Amino acid sequence: MPTPATTADVAAEANRRRTFAVISHPDAGKSTLTEALALHARVIGEAGAVHGKSGRKSVISDWMEMEQARGISITSAALQFEYAGNVINLLDTPGHADFSEDTYRVLAAVDCAVMLLDASKGLEPQTLKLFDVCRHRGVPVVTFVNKWDRPGMHALEIVDQLSERIDLQATPINWPVGEAGFFQGLLSRTDETMTTFERAPGGARAATEYVLTGAEAKAEYPDEWSTALDEVSLMDHLDVESFHTGSTTPMLFGAAVANIGVRQLLDTLVELAPAPSARVDADGVPRAVDAPFSGLVFKVQAGMDPAHRDRLAFVRVCSGRFERGTVVTHAATGKPFATKYARAMLGRDRDTVDDAFPGDIVGLVNATALTVGDTLHAEGSRVAFPPMPSFSPEHFAIARTTDTGKAKQFRRGIEQLAEEGVVQILHSDRRGDGAPMLAAVGPLQFEVATARLKQEFGVPVALDTLPYSLARRTSAEHVALLNGESGVEVTERRDGALLALFPDKWRLSSVERRHPDVHLEPLVAGT
Ligand code: GDP
């Protein structure tokens, strides 16, 4: 048994952790950046081993057949590595725009996010949604402008987009010397040096870096250097506090595919991103990182290993030291939970983990009792964190099993998927319980749900898509009136919230116009 960590050990371990996720609109280069980050930490040795997209080497985090067939990453796993004396926990998020609910939950388990922008596209629809969620949840964001090796927008235009469209002030850490596509190197703002890069063939190794003094840069790249200096002089300097509270974002430039600017990103995370800190519990009381163990279940997954039908819960350690083998308490039921088989999650390679500290992610097997949003804590040191938010659904369908002999398995399967948060389940008085209503942020969630009901529960399922696209929170006294409106249906979510569903925004405005007193409240992403 490991010796109990002292409070000072735990605080020091927490302090050297950086737990973050890379988020972006699909195709901005998230998988490529993840590979490049891991390469820098030498955990993988050769780029291409993290994500198994088309033709590239097999992956750590892809596990579902469907996911492999489509070449998209649906599930989330965490990658842990040491860098410059720090422990980096990089949480993987799905890249597909359709499957964002999972990404949002990961954001509840990190201390910081890296927002990746494609230099030729700037802010894209999914980028806007994600920025919105980060702001709403108070997650600080570092912005990395990727693909600077090819023609794109002007760096200043991207800065303007952030400030004009989402009121976010960029405070560049470095600045490109040479426009996108004519990239010569990075100007470092802290010491006004210029770093140039010599690409390794195929990006298989980190690019070799050369640092030029300002005078050398001026001599070698006179026009580009003076333009870069002029431009960057217009920019605000970094302010750590406003970064941590979300009103500014440190910005960096690079090209993940060539491993350019990636070291600078890691250094920025280590130097500036917040370490794990006290997490506020459901009563509003902060739980200090050096308090006894507590952790938050942010993801539950079944069937990760085809050989064992197990259920795995991903837990973010919030306070204290997690020690494998100890019995912890499940806050929701007060029941004990044995952690004999805790794993450090690296996709298929499940390394057993002996201990973990705030910011780390542990996978718990046989986690049938755990659901997303649950809290675990050391025996006798009770804490419960606020429940995980559910998200404003945009797709709705009625699910039925086509095999009437399987009604029981169907109900069990649906219940399990709802607990894992694969789909949301809504109850409507208009419909029988045999045909539950599924709701999702993206339609791909429905496909995952039907595939899993078939594979894991042996239940064939048919879905009837419903013509709704908008949900609004309402109150009990307005249910009858809303249900009387044509095309509108009121449903109840598992947490008791009443959601009125509308086919489109025109129908919604028409109801709002005619009934200005009816309570119809937008669901912010993440509520
Ligand atoms: P994801 O969907 O966000 O995970 O994006 P991927 O990492 O799969 O990248 C999408 C495409 O952009 C791939 O074809 C990558 O090779 C390419 N890509 C990623 N980073 C860069 C970059 O820095 N420069 C260029 N030119 N292409 C890149």
Image (spheres, rainbow, N blue to C red):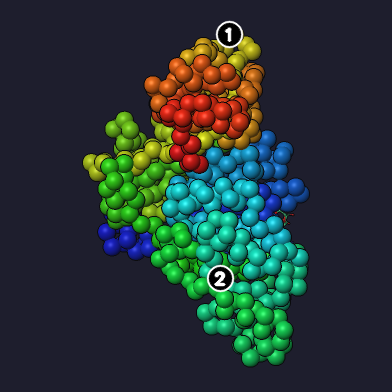
What's the mark number on residue 274? none
Residue 496 found in image quarter:
top left
Q: Residue at x 57, y 79 (%)?
A: 233
Q: Residue at x 64, y 34 (%)?
A: 444
Q: What residue appears at the point 46 percent right and 34 percent down from the top-left corner?
A: 521
Q: Secondary structure at mark 2?
A: strand
Q: Could you tell which of marks 1 and 2 lies nearer the N-terminus?
A: 2
User: The residue under label 2 is which amino acid type?
Assistant: Pro
Check disc 1 and give the amino acid type.
Gly
Label 2 packing within 10 angstroms: few (<14), some (14-19), many (20+): many
Image vertical order of residue 372 relative to residue 401, above or below? below
Say which residue appears at 39% left-offset and 57% top-offset. 276
Image coords of residue 171 (percent x, y): 53, 69
Q: Residues within 10 Å of mark 1 (few under 14, many from 20)?
A: few
The answer to whether residue 85 is seen in the rendering is no
Above-or-below relation of 285 to 498: below
Percent x, y of residue 248: 49, 63
Count of picture labels = 2
Tag 1 residue = 405
**Quadrant location, the C terminus:** top left
Asked which quadrant contains residue 230, the reply is: bottom right
Indicate the secondary structure of the residue bearing disc 1.
helix
Q: Which residue is tagged 2?
A: 172
Residue 503, given in percent of the width and then of the height, sits at: 61, 27
Q: Residue furthest top?
A: 405
